[in-house]
């Protein structure tokens, strides 16, 4: 499971779905079967994965864990409306160019001074090549950095649904061939194609072309068994009885009509809080005190408040 | 700059296997939009994981073929239905003792076929029988089945190919033999044949659901779209709702883009200078002038009396599905008076809201004059020069005063007024129809009685905000 990576050879180090499963677990991410399968396929077909799901179920965490497992650098790009090529791909270091021009003004003057007329002066300048448009003055942004990594990387494009249509079209170009063209320098092709994750909160429909280009993975709320494993992995040392109780409670909470259902990150936080408070067993009072860790809206807390007694009782029965 | 090309993934040249191709056909028929590229990806993915583990296959194809939540649900349903048949296994089948028998049965070659079928029926191995049926069905061309009336035909065809006739003869022969043993065997065979008929019918019915579904769905959809809304029955309502939602979504995605146009022709000097102060004002980064195109604000007035009520329902359903592209939707219901129903629709689920509105309005006959007067009294102050007013009604006032003066004032205030009339154009102006008295003040008067009409109207509305 150690990745050394080679320069030219593409990675073939996810040999099976089980290996992906075990690998992710080794870094603390409990993946469902679907996730490991998607990762395996994406790796071998060399396609990006579009991960959709409610907030807090582990979409970003997945990318981080994959990077950690395969020991590849994680390059993260957060999308927002108005994100354009300059901020995503590359930018010239204008300040540096300007500064160098000023400092070297004398030098430039002396070089040109040797020539007699305008034409030879320009020829002279040309002969220096595009000095001020070389790699030194190029500021690579996340996408270009991902392509330049010598051993490959994990590229996380977060909340791609917040960007606009033009940006999607631009992304499509990169995700198809893993190469970009910088007019002044030439084509940059990825040494090792990065593993690309796109996350979306489904605030708007993504363009068809982008969707067709990617594999689609939906991560929903986990079932009881999986959630117990996840919390067990993230909150080591938690008492099993408490774990069963709190998982049962959260699962029941998700059935109610709430504005924002508690997701996995919230249940992990709650587990941590309970452990900090040295809770042995879930009681109504404890729940009332800590409910604001799970639910983030006043209206939800009120709505759930009426049902706390009933839900606590049921979760206590789940252990017994 | 490292420019080493990495070796491209080996394009698998193996053709997509038969079961996969048929599954794609079925999936497309069920409504999943699968492009050719995705079909190729599916083939490659399946080559990677194989057919052996059904759960893995399900997840794999799901990742490749279903790209939205709705599609995923549809996909899972289709997958489960298609792969219900147990014989489905692509790995080289071990030559079982009955393999040759099933092959012969499938070919249904005369008496040998009959013998083979009889053997199969006696051993009663469901897998082998299923395999034989599957092969015979394929030869009979069951994937071409279109109508439920063809069911019995196909069943007979399939069973005959399996050698049914010969088995019948054998049963007759056994019965005429007379011995107890032979009679018993004959009875057993008969019972097995009964079961075979049932299995055959079941099989063909499943095939009908799978293969014919696509065609019938499209036909049904086309019918619903062009049907007069007033002719619809209660049970079509659910399907109509789905259709309306789909159309609304399509319109929304198309027109959401249009509204973010920026007028990139003019350089915004001030903004540019401010941005480039760090570099002494040299315009490395340019800023352009924006032209804000606002979403249309809509006020919808719906007649809820008589047959027009149906159309109103669908119009409202439409309009409320478009909250993404319409800025401000306010809706009103009228018959002989007018009330605002925006809150009712925003807060309650659709069916309840409609019922509530219907009960509170009563079933009075239309009186446009008084309805307009109510509107002017209560809400005309909210009509601005950015508002689009849509009125849905047949303009039949039962002889009451049409109050075109109110209407004239309204049309001057608003950006534009659109009148949608569910009646046939030939009925306009006849009897108590006042439509031509209101028409001069409207920017658009349209016949609107089917879903297609609604779509067109709303599309036009969005295109020219």
Image: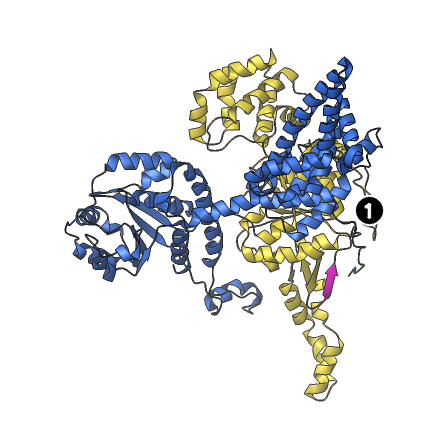
Which subunit holds the residue at mark 1? Answer: A
Q: Quadrant of the N terminus of chain B?
A: bottom right
Chain A color in figure = yellow
Q: Residue at x 73, y 17 (%)?
A: B183
Residues shaded magenta: A184-192
Of the pair A99 and B89, the residue shown nearer to us: B89
Horizontal side of B414 relative to A51 (left or right) equals left
Of the pair B31 and B132, the residue shown nearer to us: B132
Horizontal side of B341 relative to A155 (left or right) equals left
Residue A145, horizontal then vertical, whole percent: 70, 54
Residue B446, horizontal then vertical, whole percent: 32, 57
Q: Quadrant of residue A49?
A: top right
Q: Residue at x 71, y 32 (%)?
A: B165
Chain B color in figure = blue
Q: Residue at x 63, y 45 (%)?
A: B144
Does B235 appear in magenta?
Answer: no
Mark 1 neighbour class, 10 Å CA radius: few under 14, some 14 to 19, many 20 or more:
some
Q: Quadrant of the C terminus of chain B?
A: bottom left
For mark 1, what is the residue? A5
Of the pair A291 and B264, the residue shown nearer to us: B264
């Amino acid at each position: 499971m150690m990745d050394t990576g080679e320069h030219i050879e593409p990675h073939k180090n996810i040999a099976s779905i089980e290996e992906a499963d075990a690998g992710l677990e080794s870094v603390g991410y409990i993946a469902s079967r679907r996730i490991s399968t998607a990762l395996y396929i994406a790796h071998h077909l060399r396609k990006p994965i579009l991960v959709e799901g409610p907030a807090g179920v582990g979409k970003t965490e997945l990318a981080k864990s994959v990077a950690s497992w395969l020991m590849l650098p994680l390059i993260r790009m957060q999308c927002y409306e108005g994100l354009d090529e300059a901020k995503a791909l590359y930018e010239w270091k204008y300040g540096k160019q300007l500064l160098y021009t000023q400092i070297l003004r004398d030098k430039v003057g002396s070089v040109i001074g040797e020539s007699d007329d305008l034409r030879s002066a320009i020829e002279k300048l040309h002969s220096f090549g595009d000095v001020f448009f070389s790699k030194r003055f190029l500021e690579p942004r996340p996408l270009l950095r991902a392509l330049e990594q010598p051993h490959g990387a994990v590229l996380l494009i977060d909340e791609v649904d917040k960007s606009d249509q033009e940006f999607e079209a631009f992304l499509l170009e990169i995700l198809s061939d893993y190469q970009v063209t910088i007019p002044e320098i030439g084509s940059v092709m990825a040494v090792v194609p990065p593993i690309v994750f796109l996350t979306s909160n489904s605030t708007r429909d993504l363009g068809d072309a982008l969707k067709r280009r990617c594999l689609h993975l939906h991560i929903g709320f986990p079932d009881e068994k999986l959630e117990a494993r996840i919390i067990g992995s993230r909150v080591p040392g938690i008492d099993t009885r408490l774990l069963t109780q709190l998982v049962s409670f959260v699962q029941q909470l998700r059935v109610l009509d709430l504005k924002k259902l508690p997701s996995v990150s919230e249940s992990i936080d709650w587990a941590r809080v309970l452990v900090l408070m040295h809770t042995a067993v879930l009681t109504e009072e404890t729940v009332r005190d800590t409910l604001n860790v799970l639910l983030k809206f006043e209206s939800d807390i009120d709505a759930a408040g009426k049902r706390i007694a009933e839900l606590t009782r049921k979760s206590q029965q789940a252990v017994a | 700059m490292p420019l080493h090309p990495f070796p491209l993934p080996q394009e698998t040249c193996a053709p997509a296997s038969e079961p996969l191709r048929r599954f794609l056909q079925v999936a497309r028929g069920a409504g999943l939009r699968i492009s050719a590229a995705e079909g190729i990806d599916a083939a490659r993915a399946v080559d990677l994981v194989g057919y052996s583990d059904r759960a893995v296959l399900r997840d794999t194809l799901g990742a490749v073929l279903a790209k939205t939540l709705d599609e995923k649900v549809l996909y899972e349903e289709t997958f489960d239905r298609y792969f219900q048949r147990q014989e489905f296994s692509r790995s080289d089948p071990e030559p079982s003792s009955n393999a040759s028998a099933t092959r012969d049965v499938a070919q249904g070659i005369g008496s040998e076929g009959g013998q083979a079928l009889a053997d199969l029926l006696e051993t009663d191995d469901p897998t082998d029988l299923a395999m034989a049926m599957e092969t015979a069905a394929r030869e009979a061309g069951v994937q071409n089945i279109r109508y439920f009336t063809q069911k019995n035909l196909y069943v007979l065809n399939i069973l005959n190919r399996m050698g049914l006739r010969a088995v019948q003869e054998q049963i007759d022969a056994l019965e005429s033999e007379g011995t107890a043993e032979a009679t018993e065997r004959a009875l057993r065979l008969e019972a097995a044949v009964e079961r075979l008929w049932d299995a055959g019918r079941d099989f063909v019915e499943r095939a009908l659901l799978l293969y014919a579904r696509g065609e019938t769905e499209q036909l049904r959809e086309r019918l619903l779209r062009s049907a007069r809304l007033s002719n619809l029955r209660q049970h079509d309502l659910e399907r109509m709702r789905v259709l309306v939602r789909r159309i609304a979504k399509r319109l929304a995605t198309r027109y959401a883009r249009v509204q973010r146009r920026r007028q990139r022709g003019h350089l915004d000097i001030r903004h540019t200078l401010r941005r480039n102060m760090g570099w002494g004002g040299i315009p490395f980064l340019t800023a352009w002038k924006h032209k804000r195109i606002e979403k249309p604000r809509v006020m919808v007035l719906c007649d809820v009396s008589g047959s027009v009520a149906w159309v109103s329902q669908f119009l409202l359903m439409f309009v409320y599905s478009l909250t993404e592209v319409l800025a401000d939707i306010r809706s009103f219901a009228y018959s002989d008076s007018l009330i605002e129903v925006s809150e009712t629709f925003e807060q309650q689920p659709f069916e309840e809201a409609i019922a509530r509105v219907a009960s509170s309005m009563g079933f009075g006959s239309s009186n446009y004059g008084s309805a307009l007067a109510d509107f002017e009294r209560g809400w005309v102050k909210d009509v601005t020069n950015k508002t689009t007013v849509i009125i849905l009604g047949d303009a039949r006032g039962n002889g009451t005063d049409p109050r075109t003066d109110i209407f004239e004032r309204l049309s001057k205030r608003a950006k534009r007024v659109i009148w949608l009339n569910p009646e046939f154009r030939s009925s306009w102006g006849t009897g108590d129809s006042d439509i031509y008295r209101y028409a001069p003040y409207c920017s658009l008067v349209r016949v609107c009685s089917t879903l297609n009409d609604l779509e067109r109207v709303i599309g036009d509305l969005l295109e020219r905000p």
